[in-house]
Structures are given as structure tokens and as C-alpha cells.
């Protein structure tokens, strides 16, 4: 148990927000859980997350030892692009789900990371497990950061929230786009027609996608994309909405293509962020998957 005395700069803020300020290894979500479990006391008594702290309050924080997670480590080959004591950056293959869930209890990226990291993980949210700070769709390949501890998890999450993380994607779309560069600024929310899908809707959250044409082919365009926001299926929804769906996308187009590709041809090629401990600016790239490069090579030959 560690005690803190509230001083003027924290006077009047919510208890859960106060905890984050007192201990930078505790997220707000974790603070709320610890408060509910009565592992955080105010003047020796249990309290609510909404309590407004006052000058002179004594805040006692008890951080229980993290429990072992139920997620089973699995020996699944994953390309590691970078790894240290705080983070691991991988090149997620197409067809792999990021986190175990209903319908995908194992065989996920998290199962693979559990096996790779073994004893180098520390408690995240009360469990010894990897911290997923951002996701890629099952059929989107590419670079993805995973936190090894709460401090890194909170830091990278804040960078993403504040739009300090730069992400670059590559996509092959159907149709020939005339504009060399453009920005798609359309709100995205849950589809009212199909709750499993996302859609451009007035009641949705702001979503901004920038694209640049890398190459035009007969009936196709190769794009580089940068996103300012990270809405679910954002790139796929935006490109489909403007009439240029991603090749192979079975949800936001008919998925038909002459290349025999199943699932969208969308790859997270690059990510740039500030390292949570060293504060060094890092830029990490993931090479195009073999199948993607083969399609591009085929299209290039047809242009000769």
C-alpha cells in the first residue's frame, strides 16, 4: 500500500483521474477497477471513482500482484520487426485475428505473443498478458505495436488518442482514381442496415483518410493511405463509399477479383511513434506480403 497526500494541483478532480496523475503506470480503466475492488482508499475508507478529491485527502493505493491470464501461449510463427523490454512490434499476417474472442478462442496474435514474450510480460489490467493498443482487421496485414507492460500500454494509447502515432497503409483498389491526392472526411458509425458492418453516417464519429496514388493500372489503382482517426474498418468503408473498394474486400464490395485473392488487399506498411521509455522517435516498416507483391508484379508486367 502506498500513500499520497492531495495537494492544490489535484484539488477537485475525480478520484479515478487523480490516480492516473499520481501513478503513471495505472490507466484510468485500471484505477476504476482498483477503486471497485477497494484497493484504493480515501482517508482509509472505500470511495467511488466519481469522488472529487480535496486538499489534504490521503489516497492509499494497493496494486495486487497480477494474475496469470487464461490466454494460452501458442507456437505460431510471427515476424518480429522490433522488440525491447517495453514493446514488441510485429508484422501481423493476413487471416490472423488480433485478440481471442467468441468464434476465435485461440490461434490469435495474442496467443502467439504470449509464447514469444514468455516471462518478459508484466501486469496489464491486473493480468500478465500483452497489451493491445491498436488493432488490424483479420484480413489486414502489417505493422502492429504490442505493449509489454502497463506503462508502455498507457503511453502508446495516449499517443494514439492525441494523434501522435503516424500510420501508413498500402491498398490496391478497384477502379482508376483520377486525383493524385485527396482527403476523405466522412463520419463513420455502425450501419443501421447490418449491425456487423460500419457505414458513412451523419450520426457517426469523425473519420479522416488521406490517400495518394502510387500507380495506376488498367482497372486498378495502388494507393498509399494515411489515417488521422482510427475508426473500425475506416479505410475500407471510405474507399468503398467513394466508389473504389479495396480488392478482395468481401464485406464492403463483392470481393470478386481475377487474382484469386480472398480478403482485402490492405497492408499497414509503416508506423511512427515516440518510444514510451527512451522518448526516441521510431519508424518501423513491414514489407508487403508475398501474395500482395505478386499481384503488383503481375499488374506491372501487363503494363509493359
Image (tube, helix red, strand yellow):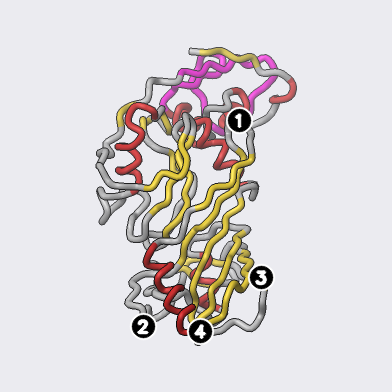
Q: Which residue is mark 1?
A: 278
Viewer-side label of 4, 3: 4
Comes first in the chain, label 3 or label 1: 3
Q: Nearer the viewer, residue 29 or 278?
A: 278
Viewer-side label of 4, 1: 4
Q: Find the residue positioned furthest to the front.
A: 304
Q: Residue at x 62, y 40 (%)?
A: 274
Q: Is residue 166 left or right of residue 114?
A: right
Q: Where is 279 relative to 242, above or below? A: above
Location of residue 204 in the rendering, given as x and y in whole percent from the top left corner: 56, 65
In the rendering, which numbered label is found on residue 11? none
Alpha-carbon span between mark 3 and mark 1: 34 Å
Q: Which residue is mark 2?
A: 258
Residue 75 in sight in this render: yes
Location of residue 201 in the rendering, given as x and y in whole percent from the top left corner: 56, 72
Q: Where is 241 relative to 286, above or below? A: below
Q: Which residue is mark 4?
A: 303
Q: Main secondary structure of the magenta part?
A: loop
Tell me the SS state at disc 1. Answer: loop
Are there few (<14), some (14-19), or many (20+) residues within 10 Å of tag 3? Answer: few
Q: Residue at x 58, y 66 (%)?
A: 224
Tell me the SS state at disc 3. Answer: strand
Viewer-side label of 2, 3: 2
- The magenta region covers 37-62
Comes first in the chain, label 2 or label 3: 3
Comes first in the chain, label 4 or label 3: 3
Q: Nearer the viewer, residue 49 or 29?
A: 29
Q: Is residue 201 left or right of residue 135?
A: right
Q: Which residue is mark 3?
A: 183
Comes first in the chain, label 2 or label 1: 2
Amino acid at each position: 500500500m502506498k500513500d499520497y497526500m492531495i495537494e492544490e494541483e489535484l484539488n477537485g478532480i475525480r478520484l479515478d483521474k487523480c490516480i492516473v496523475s499520481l501513478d503513471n503506470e495505472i490507466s484510468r480503466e485500471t484505477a476504476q477497477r482498483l477503486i471497485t475492488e477497494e484497493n484504493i482508499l480515501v482517508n482509509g475508507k472505500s470511495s467511488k471513482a466519481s469522488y472529487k478529491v480535496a486538499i489534504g485527502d490521503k489516497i492509499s493505493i494497493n496494486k495486487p500482484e497480477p494474475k496469470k491470464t487464461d490466454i494460452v501461449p501458442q507456437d505460431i510463427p510471427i515476424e518480429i520487426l522490433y522488440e525491447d523490454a517495453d514493446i514488441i512490434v510485429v508484422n501481423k499476417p493476413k487471416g490472423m485475428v488480433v485478440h481471442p474472442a467468441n468464434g476465435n478462442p485461440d490461434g490469435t496474435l495474442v496467443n502467439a505473443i504470449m509464447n514469444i514474450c514468455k516471462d518478459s510480460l508484466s501486469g496489464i489490467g491486473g493480468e500478465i498478458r500483452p497489451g493491445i493498443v491498436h488493432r488490424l482487421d483479420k484480413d489486414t496485414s502489417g505493422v502492429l505495436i504490442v505493449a509489454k507492460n502497463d506503462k508502455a500500454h498507457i503511453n502508446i494509447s495516449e499517443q494514439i488518442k492525441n494523434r501522435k502515432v503516424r500510420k501508413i497503409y498500402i491498398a490496391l483498389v478497384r477502379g482508376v482514381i483520377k486525383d493524385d491526392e485527396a482527403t476523405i472526411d466522412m463520419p463513420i458509425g455502425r450501419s443501421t442496415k447490418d449491425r456487423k458492418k460500419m457505414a458513412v453516417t451523419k450520426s457517426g464519429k469523425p473519420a479522416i483518410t488521406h490517400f495518394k496514388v502510387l500507380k495506376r493500372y488498367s482497372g486498378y489503382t495502388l494507393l498509399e493511405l494515411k489515417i488521422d482517426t482510427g475508426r473500425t474498418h475506416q479505410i475500407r468503408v471510405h474507399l468503398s463509399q467513394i466508389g473504389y473498394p479495396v480488392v478482395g474486400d468481401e464485406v464492403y464490395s463483392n470481393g470478386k477479383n481475377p487474382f484469386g485473392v480472398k480478403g482485402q488487399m490492405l497492408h499497414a506498411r509503416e508506423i511512427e511513434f515516440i518510444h514510451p521509455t527512451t522518448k526516441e522517435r521510431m519508424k518501423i516498416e513491414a514489407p508487403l506480403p508475398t501474395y500482395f507483391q505478386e499481384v503488383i508484379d503481375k499488374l506491372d508486367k501487363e503494363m509493359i
